[in-house]
Amino acid sequence: MPYPRKTTPDQDAEMCYLWDVFGMSVTKLGKRFNIHRAAAHRIVTRRFHRSMKNFILSTNGAIRAAIKFIDALPLKTAHGQHYEVVIRLHQKKANYEQQKRHFARMGWLAENLWVDGKLFSKDTWHEHWKRQILGYSELPNGEKIGLPSPNTAKEYAAFDNAIDQHLAEEYGVWVPEPGEAEYEQYARRSA
């Protein structure tokens, strides 16, 4: 028997409810809704991951929406799982423009800053600053790897400011800022 191409949003919601609350298998869901079990699995897992919501509590409406969402959740799923609510201060993630600026500046260093008669790639400079400013982890073979790049906009700005300070103190170098002709040339290359 051929399977239909798509299910309706109402069928998707019912499928997720049967899977989440009653623990119906994706094979049984596929038979019940006349779709392939892989399609049923995609629908319920996509919907389940969509149920992991983040609410930025900046207005009374957002607070009411969060409470309404929590109130609609069952206490326990059929799979024996419980839900977890975590409340923390919201932090803006580092944006594309910050990362683009950072790597354009690393590109400028790669082409202009000679250290002991050598030029280094922008990735090498990035790794160098991660190790020097953020710290590093030591691998079992003794190698050192820089800690992950900052995630928030505030952390990324502090990271770039620390790089500027180190460049000025250690190498006597100033890196062009956005809007300056030299910066624009390297920003286009790093994009």
Image (cartoon, helix red, strand yellow):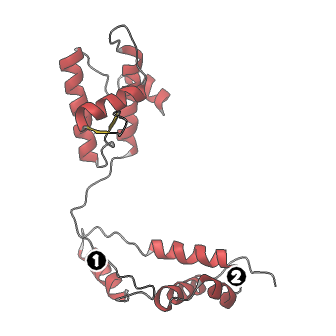
Of 26 and 73, the residue lying toward us:
26
Q: Residue at x 43, y 24 (%)?
A: 186
Secondary element at tag 2: loop
Name the residue beneath numbered marker 1. Answer: 61
Secondary element at tag 1: helix
Depicted 39 relative to depicted 127: above or below? below
Q: Quadrant of residue 97?
A: top left
Position of the N terminus, as image quadrant, is bottom right
Q: In this rendering, does residue 27 appear at all? A: yes
User: Could you tell me how far apart the alpha carbons at marks 1 and 2 are, in whole angstroms?
Assistant: 38 Å
- Which amino acid type is shown beneath numbered disc 2? Ile
Q: Residue at x 69, y 88 (%)?
A: 31
Q: Give the number of the mark in front: 1 or 2.
A: 2
Depicted 93 relative to depicted 20: above or below? above
Q: Quadrant of residue 170?
A: top left
Task: Check disc 2: other Cα within 10 Å, few if <14, some if 14-19, many if 20+.
Answer: many
Q: In this rendering, does residue 178 appear at all? A: no
- Which amino acid type is shown beneath numbered disc 1? Gly
Q: Residue at x 70, y 82 (%)?
A: 35
Q: Residue at x 38, y 39 (%)?
A: 99
Residue found farthest to the right: 1
Picture coordinates of residue 126 (x, y %)? Answer: 36, 31
Name the residue beneath numbered marker 2. Answer: 35
Depicted 155 relative to depicted 2: above or below? above
**Residue 134 falls left or right of residue 79:** left
**Residue 18 falls left or right of residue 75:** right
